[in-house]
Image (tube, rainbow, N blue to C red):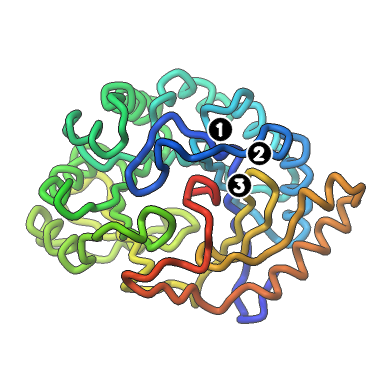
Amino acid sequence: MIDSCGRRIDYMRVSITDRCNLRCRYCMPEDQPFIEHDQILRYEEIIRICRAATKLGVRNIKITGGEPLVRRGCCELIEQIKALPGIEHVTVTTNGVLLEEVVPRFREIGVDGVNISLDTLRPDVYAKITGRDSFDAVWRGLCAAVDAGLRVKINCVPLSGVNEDELCSLAMLARNWPVDVRFIEMMPIGLGGSMEPVPAEEVRARVREAFPDLTPDPKKHGFGPARYFTSGALKGSIGFIEAVSHSFCTGCNRVRLTSEGFFKLCLYHDDGADLRALLRGGANDDEIAGAMSRAILKKPRAHAFIPGQAAEESRGMSQIGG
């Protein structure tokens, strides 16, 4: 489907839970209340929405949370979504804590890619960022995914005074493995709005210290906004996602479904359509697709992030779907 700004919408991020087994300092406070279970979409409801989305041209699905692997039956849901006519790619974003045990199932299902959040290579700093002593589990999951031949992307959020001295070390993972290491600029959403980001120019300068011959990578790496670079020393690639300093709104191809069934058009703006109410009110698949279509035509032209200013969106990243 083409929105009112001429953008082709073919990618939907689907959050299946707002719960997580970590408490990353820029994402989820320790005392965050969770949505009641009966308010979370059932898997059959998620399938219906994904099926309706295919009628509008959505071909690529990203499964997110919270942490999607904490929800029982996640793998079976992924398998069902992959089987929907019209769906071409299903990928998963995870913090990696529970990844090791599901890697064989992911390979069997044919998961098209796994994004793993990893902001540091030091266990003590990991505990400081996430509030949990889970680095070893994440590392085992990362190694298992690479060894299994899964398409792996590593997501790092540079944090001022916390991990900026590790950016080159993290980038080195793409030298040793055929993975994409992506540096994601802190966005003013939820807790992230009160934290000091590392300037995008500084991140790129630090990475170039390790790989001075970085050049734009012409290969397609997925369906998101990252700008990828390659080097003669790399087996993988380095990516930069800079939503604040280098907006990519003119080419935005995505919509989001929160775990409670809100069809969200832009990470920054708190508008969209309540699909859960329609589902539980007896709407058929065509009516669901119609509501999604009307919403997409109202997709904002741009997010209008302003550094240091909180977003119009009142929910945190874990509640929206990271």
Mark closest to the chain's N terminus, 2 or 3:
3
Label 1 belongs to which residue?
110
The residue sitting at 49% across, 77% down in the picture is 250
In the rendered image, residue 181, in percent from the top left (x then y), is placed at 28, 48
Spatial CA distance of label 1 from label 2 is: 8 Å
Disc 1 vs disc 3: Cβ atoms closer than 8 Å?
no
Q: Is residue 322 above or below residue 96?
A: below
Do the residues bearing badges 2 and 3 touch, measured as CB atoms within 8 Å?
no
Q: Nearer the viewer, residue 294 or 180?
A: 294
Mark 3 neighbour density, 10 Å: few (under 14) some (14–19) many (20 or more): many
Q: Position of residue 232 (x, y in %)?
A: 16, 53
| Amino acid type for the residue under numbered disc 3 | Val
x and y, in percent, of residue 76 in the image: 65, 27
Q: Secondary structure at mark 2?
A: helix
Residue toward you, 51 or 88: 51
Image disc number at residue 14: 3
Name the residue carrying label 2. Answer: 82
Query: Helix or strand or loop: what does disc 3 sit on?
Result: strand
Real-space CA distance between mark 1 and mark 3, rounded to the nearest whole angstrom: 18 Å
Query: Nearer the observer, disc 1 or disc 3?
Result: 3
The N terminus - image quarter: bottom right
- Residue at disc 1, secondary structure: loop
Q: Quadrant of residue 115?
A: top left
| Circle number at residue 269 | none
Question: Is 234 on the left or on the right of 22, as rendered?
Answer: left
In the rendered view, tell whether residue 73 sits above or below residue 3.
Answer: above
**Tag 1: amino acid:** Gly
Instruction: Report, in whole angstroms, how far the alpha carbon at label 2 lies from the one at label 3.
Output: 13 Å
Question: Do the residues bearing badges 1 and 2 touch, measured as CB atoms within 8 Å?
Answer: yes
Classify residue 220 as left or right of residue 312: left
